[in-house]
Amino acid sequence: MIDVLLGLQWGDEGKGKIVDYLAAKYDIIARFQGGPNAGHTLYVDGQKVVLRTIPSGVFQSHCLNLIGNGVVIDPVSLQAELTQLVSIRPDVLERLFVSQKAHLILPTHRALDAASEAAKGVDKIGSTLKGIGPAYMDKTGRNGLRVGDVLNKDFDKKYEQLKQKHVQMLRQYNYEVNWQEWEAEFFESIKYLRSLQIVNAEYWLDAHIKNGKKILAEGAQGSMLDIDYGTYPFVTSSNTIASGVCNGLGVAPSRIGEVYGISKAYCTRVGSGPFPTELDNEVGEALRKAGNEFGAVTGRSRRCGWIDLVALRYTVMLSGVTQIILTKADVLDGFKELYAGVAYTIEGQETNEFPFDICGTDLSPVYKQFDGWEQPISECNSYETLPESFKKYCNFVENYLGTRIAYISNGTGRDQLLITPQ
Ligand code: IMP
Ligand code: MG
């Protein structure tokens, strides 16, 4: 069976820490979408590590790690990440497998990302500029280069053809990006990529499933950034919800077991686009400070707001979430009162449904108020010792979503994860 873990909001829900924890129970961790736009932060022996393309199972020495076909790989970024990891865990390379069908991010994809964002001006998506969108466009446009291609003799020729196409596109943008400087390191990293364990991943996984191995699919970004169901066009370019696991790893829907959905106890978003419960005021600022809400990949400060249960119920539904993991609960310590968005008012009408065109509508959230607490959550070491008013908040969230909160994360430490009673 394959269990799934994914973010239910706009990303940065704390997936890295949770996968690292859950990995103890799994034999294989597999990434199924996204690319180096992801930044999964883990603390290993007190040292902060940010994973971009590598699955978060690398620090568990019994875990194999797979980069699936749904991922877009920037070989330069992958090499840099692996070089750092090898110095911490020398056996990483033996435990890493890469799908031959994963698509490659070229230097010109990164250039196109920058040029396209610049051309959008004030309407820019706020992309991480890692070349993700242009690489997925070439995938669906049937022009892309895949990992398996690097083992073929005509790789350089194929690269040249695609590059020429990009050069033409770049000319039309009339925006200078010095991607030529990135070409030498790209070819160096292709050599490195050839030395990794490149596999026919769908067969590889199938064999492991038949052998009774336990697999966890690790999502990146968040459900509200899904290309189909997110706040389009302010989204990423892949399917971040549970259905993405089937396409991104080549596994059948009947193989999916538990679906862990991660949500912060509040809400954040990095980049542009709608965010109904955003607090563009001193409360939002206080959340940013308490939660240290600055992007792991870009360093940008994240927009902060209260938990949005309308959006959460939507994403729980889309992925068939079976267990919720609530993270960064300790960040709410010190707030005298807190709120949860429970409905939206659109043109005088109240609704619980996430609307089609959230960008163009005059929308205001309806809030439910909760009391804060005195005793710091970060110091609690069991569910029982949590403040009563926080438990009330959790019960309300569970009832609203119709799904159990199975874990509560109350700090960055590996041991700061409370299991709720069944
Ligand atoms: P892109 O995927 O880099 O093109 O970015 C598209 C949008 O998704 C932007 O608003 C980014 O800030 C956001 N985004 C992409 N990856 C992540 C992530 O891992 N965490 C949070 N936001 C992300
Ligand atoms: Mg992140």
Image (spheres, grey):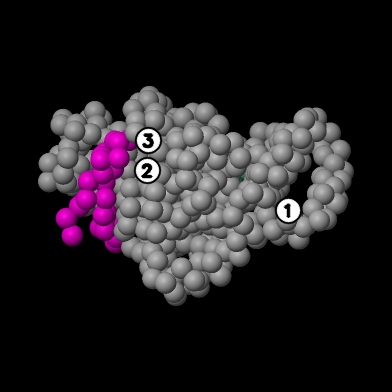
Is disc 1 in contact with disc 3, using a CB cutoff of under 8 Å? Answer: no
Is disc 1 in contact with disc 2, using a CB cutoff of under 8 Å? Answer: no
Q: In which quarter of the image is residue 266?
A: top left
Could you give the CA–CA distance between mark 1 and mark 2, rounded to whole angstroms?
33 Å
Can you tell which of label 1 and label 3 is closer to the viewer? 1
Residue 148 is a magenta residue:
no
Of callouts 1 and 3, the N-terminal one: 3
Can you tell which of label 2 and label 3 is closer to the viewer? 3
Label 3 beta carbon less than 8 Å to ligand 2 = no
Of callouts 2 and 3, the N-terminal one: 2
Amino acid at the residue labelled 3: Tyr
Could you give the CA–CA distance between mark 1 and mark 3, rounded to whole angstroms?
34 Å
Amino acid at the residue labelled 2: Lys
Question: Residue 357 location, x and y as percent?
Answer: 56, 52
Vertical position of residue 78 compared to residue 180: above or below: below
Residue 338 tag number: none
Could you give the CA–CA distance between mark 2 and mark 3, rounded to whole angstroms?
8 Å
Question: Residue 361 location, x and y as percent?
Answer: 54, 47
Residue at numbered disc 3: 43
Q: Which residue is drawn at 77% across and 57% down?
A: 152
Q: Which residue is drawn at 46% across and 30% down?
A: 294
Residue at numbered disc 1: 150
Residue at numbered disc 2: 17
Residue 421 is a magenta residue:
yes
Q: Residue at x 56, y 36 (%)?
A: 83
Q: In which quarter of the image is residue 100?
A: bottom right
Q: Which residue is drawn at 61% across and 65% down?
A: 200
Amino acid at the residue labelled 1: Val
- Within 10 Å of disc 1 (Cα), the crowding (few <14, some 14-19, many 20+) is some
In the image, the segment drawn in magenta is 399-422
